Image (cartoon, helix red, strand yellow):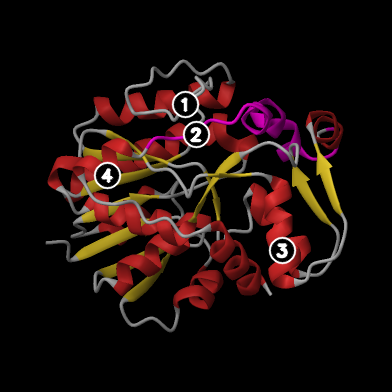
Amino acid sequence: MMKKAVVLGATGSIGYAITKELAEKGVNTIAFSRTRSKLMTLFGDHSAITVCAGNVFHINDLREACRQADLIVHAINIPYQDWERDLHTIMDNVLKVTEEAHARLAVVDNIYAYSDNPGYPIAETHKKQPHTKKGRLRLSLEKRIWESNVKALIAHFPDFYGPYAGNTLLGQTFKGVSQNKPALFVGKLSTPREYIYTPDAAKALITLAAHEKAYGQNWNIPGSGVITGEQIFTILRERLSYKKSVWSIGKKAIAFMGWFQPLMKEAVEMLYLTENPIILSGEKYESVIDEIPRTPYEQGIVDTVRAMR
């Protein structure tokens, strides 16, 4: 039985939802992140959550947070421009502390290691042959996990959206909507893409982490089907009376912005995911673990914008 869990990156888009889900299930939960004030704002009033401010690059900070943990959730995300320099160091520290604590590790991952769209939902058996720098980096982190002595699972998710998930593609779009300003949408509005509501992702991950059979494997966790940008804004206009204009931006605009913003410069190579999106299959999860939570977009989008307001 899971008694104590640590969420690394607890103030992030998915880390927040995972921390809340663990606490709601009655698990003694440590919320670990760098900024104590943000931790207190998000979790200070939750009796089942203990906040722990620390630096993931200081291994003693991690040791202190993860002492006697049953489960460690690696949900740390850092800016694209820091990936090449820092991601391996972070993973090495997390693996070392997890092994020392004799805990299990659940890793939140994206879909970057899947480089192509075969025209059907991708299962875990789909070969990973990333053609981007970031995709190759994510795959190298995966190999590091499987070469370690840690009992781990890796969960692959599509793009996140949800309450407190502001640093995501849809999160940036919904910021403008929540402020009743013109909104930016990355990619073509007519392209069907997949997103996952963060409370759904958190429920799926924690359910997965509770199963002995889940460890030593990759798991693909899809959202509630696909949706176009046009359909998203139809929901916003009909349910929230949003009437401002929408600006669709593509590779050329992002590349231009990259001259001034390091994050945008690094984002360019990943825009193939907005042009020929990858869709995940949840067949393995649902046949082995449980039904995947799937909040309808109509509900998730409205709840997200209302939370942002």
Q: Are marks 3 and 2 in contact (CB under 8 Å)?
A: no
- In this view, 134 is above or below 221: above
Query: Could you tell which of marks 4 and 1 lies nearer the N-terminus?
Result: 1
Q: Residue flagged by tag 2: what amino acid is it?
A: Ile
How far is mark 4 from mark 2, CA to CA?
16 Å
> Is the C terminus in the top left, top right, bottom left or bottom right quadrant?
bottom right
The magenta segment: 259-281
**Residue at which label 1 appears:** 120
Indicate yes or no whether the magenta region holds residue 12.
no
The amino acid type, in three-letter code, at marker 3 is Leu
Inter-mark Cα distance, 4 to 3: 31 Å
Q: Pinpoint residue 254: horizontal percent, then vertical percent.
A: 80, 35
Query: Callout 4: 10 Å neighbours few (<14), some, many (20+)?
Result: few
Picture quadrant of residue 238: bottom right
Q: Give the residue number, with chain letter if any, for mark 2.
A: 279
Instruction: Look at mark 4 in the image and give the residue it sits on.
Output: 286
In the rendered structure, the answer to whether residue 213 lies left or right of residue 286 reads: left
First of labels 4, 3 by sequence position: 3
Mark 4 or 2, nearer chain start: 2
Callouts 1 and 2 close, C-beta under 8 Å: yes
Classed neighbour count for the residue bearing mark 3: other residues with Cα under 10 Å, few (<14), some (14–19), many (≥20): some
Query: Which quadrant of the structure image shows residue 161?
Result: bottom right
> Does the residue at mark 4 contact the one at mark 3 (Cβ under 8 Å)?
no
